[in-house]
Amino acid sequence: MMLALAAAPAVHAQEAPVSAAPQAEAGTDGGVIMVTARRREESLLETPVTLSVMTAANLAKLNVNNVLDLQAFTPGLYAQQTSSGRVDRSYSQITIRGISDPLNPTVSVFLDGTPVNFDVINNLGNEVSRVEVLKGPQSAAFGRQSFAGAINVVTRDPGDAFRWNFDGTLGSYSLYDIKANIELPIVKDAIGLRIGGRRYGFDGQYTNPYDGSRLGAQQTETINGTLVIKPFDGLRLKAFGMYLEDHDGAGAAGFSSRLPVNTFNCNAGAAPTGVNNFYCGKIPQFPTSQMGQNPATPAFIDQVVNNSLGILNPTYKAINDHAGLERREIVTNLAVDFTIPGTDIVLSSLTGYNKTRIQSNQDLDGRDTSDMPNTTVSTIPGFVGDPFINYPTMAMYKQRAVSQEFRATSGSNQPLRWMVGANYFKVSNRSYTVALYPNTIQVFGDGSLNTLVDKSVFGSLSYDFSPQFTLNAEGRYIEEELKVYFRNPQTLRTSGKYRRFVPRVSAQYKFTPDLMGYATYSRGMNKGGFNLSVLPLTAEQRAYLEERASVTNIYKPAIIDNYELGLKGTIAQVFSFSAAVFYAKWKDQAITNSIQVPNATPGASDIGVGVTQNSGRSTVKGAEIEGNLKVTNALSINFNAGYNKVELDTAIPCASCVAITGNSTVAAGAQNPAAPVFTSNIGAEYGVDIGDGYRWFVRGDYAHRSRIYTTYENISWIGDANKVNLRTGIGSENLDVQLFVNNVFNDKSYTGVQSTTSLLGGNAVVLSMPVKRNGGIRIRFGF
């Protein structure tokens, strides 16, 4: 649907009119959508990359406020907020074309071309000019961790006239979302400033049976600014900055486990007879009576968060004394473009700096255990445990990232076009996790420093052999170095380095001025990582692992080779579309395993060591289509569909499967879990002018998502999702009122799933609970 949505009027520097009922022209009105999918600005039709674009007008019209909303209108995109045994906004797991990796993200998010954390896409408010979702490996253009694709969010520029806008939403479950911005032309045509802010709140849709608190409550405040300076022709500077705070309650999760009440529906093979240890088939509705959590008890707040015993060494002072999430984040970037006098060559500098602090207080066992008395005895002086068996946990995360890119780009109005550049990216993070156990305090991550430095050089060439035929070649040489340090004192613990060249070659042909086809080969590289578990081993044990299983202190980055055919264009000025088919081979896939090594003590039993190996290989294949049909001036229809299948080419080890089915391997042919095979959306909008500059519209959208498997064994899954959204409203250039109802028929499908283990014993499955029917009113006005 998003190419169709690209049918909205071309994006200008100034704020688009607030009307919530723009014509759904999606490329059928002659408007030109500009994108930056290849690090240079070019029209959507001339870009030989499969991508979906959503403009600011359509983000507003469809009430798309975050990546969870965005996925319904983007074929091949899937997102969930289920990670590390919890469901909250601390992390968004984004998947494109079904390519998901539980160890490393396969999709990166960029803000004006600079890398940012995933949560930034959810908190930009009205500062978005457009969102570009690029499908397939983008490593040649965007570098690391754009293995399966990338999302680039382009922010608005301030206009050349004074302007202010207000955007407010009120809805069910105490929803409020207030956004406002102002644009100031400080020096006409030379200096412009845009300042905006947002305040968002939501009470959550579920109740914690333990204490009656709300599960899934969220609150966000942001303030941001954009400054554009054009001191003279040929020089342009754009600076963007944002500060945000998130204040969330405990997440709305169904944590299925055997204790305290067994919520599984079958014995998958590894449990004693008559004992259910997992799910089989479609996962049934999780009973809300079992959603209780005990994440912020007085003993936990006192001894863990406030460190009353003085035995902890957190990485920073706690910022959260309640159940749920607290986040503080700074996001900045600076773009400088200088055109060399007398030429069309542009020299560009792009600088990014981001700083994040997160603290999440959660119940690691995920269940209400207040009926399980704690009779254990502690050896820690002064320790006071909860009166019941409980595992509340504080997870702290601190990250700082800086990026710098320099590039030179030729003009676009010549047959031979080129680009050369260099990029530097460094991210440093510390993770400190500590839990209150029934009789002790357990530290999981001690806050040691981890760093990654990515250095790359890149370039591209495009040549028009004729007005119809163009050949493009792009490439990036990447060197990454990972380091892990001890904390006290901060000395190097281990390091690893790898280098790769990632190319992309494409040929494109214009059948008509409005119809273009392309064929592409591209290679993607994902991040490698450490096997820290091998470091405490003896030299003989490490040599054994390397010889027998090719395991060292570091595992390699995965590689994917992608082949793609695409067609995009507009027919008769009433139908715009984009379609692609693709086939890819995923090699050196990171797979976790447990390997037995000889015990260092003679005569003692072998020991199991958890490691990550590059032992997986998979085939990726699928197709996508999206389009928009302008039936009449009043009626338009848009649609999208994506089919993405990722299957193992080889059997892989599966240490976690032993406790589920009793098997230690997964056979070839298994489907990659954590993403659907098929997604689709169809929407229709009818709108008419009603006089005095006002337009009335009514719109309906139906979104479908197929099942998502829980594990590689494919024995259980969350069922299909089928959701209908309705909205209607009236609008003019300066005023807009919209009524909306989401999930009209109250579809009860889960929004995410993850397999893990329970501290209470046995397996566990974390379920992101259904989003219930909700509705509200949105009012926008501005001058």
Image (cartoon, grey):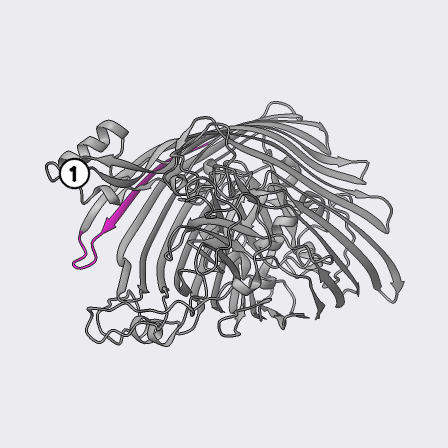
Please identify the quarter of the rendering in which residue 329 is found: bottom left
Outermost residue to the right: 691
Quadrant in which the C terminus appears: bottom right
Q: In which quadrant of the rendered image does the N terminus lie?
A: top right
- Amino acid type for the residue under numbered disc 1: Asn
Please give left or right for residue 631 compared with residue 741 in the image. Answer: right
Residue holding disc 1? 599
Residue 4 on the magenta segment: no
Q: Position of residue 425 (x, y in %)?
A: 37, 48
Q: Main secondary structure of the magenta part?
A: strand
Q: Residue 219: in sight, yes or no?
A: no
SS of the residue under disc 1: loop
Residue 54 or 654: which is nearer the viewer? 654
Q: Residue furthest front?
A: 273
Report x, y in % for residue 155: 56, 56
| Residue 481 drawn in magenta | yes
x then y, percent, for residue 550: 27, 30
Q: Which residues are magenta?
A: 475-491
Q: Is residue 194 visible?
A: yes
Tell me which residue sits at (11%, 40%) in the image: 601
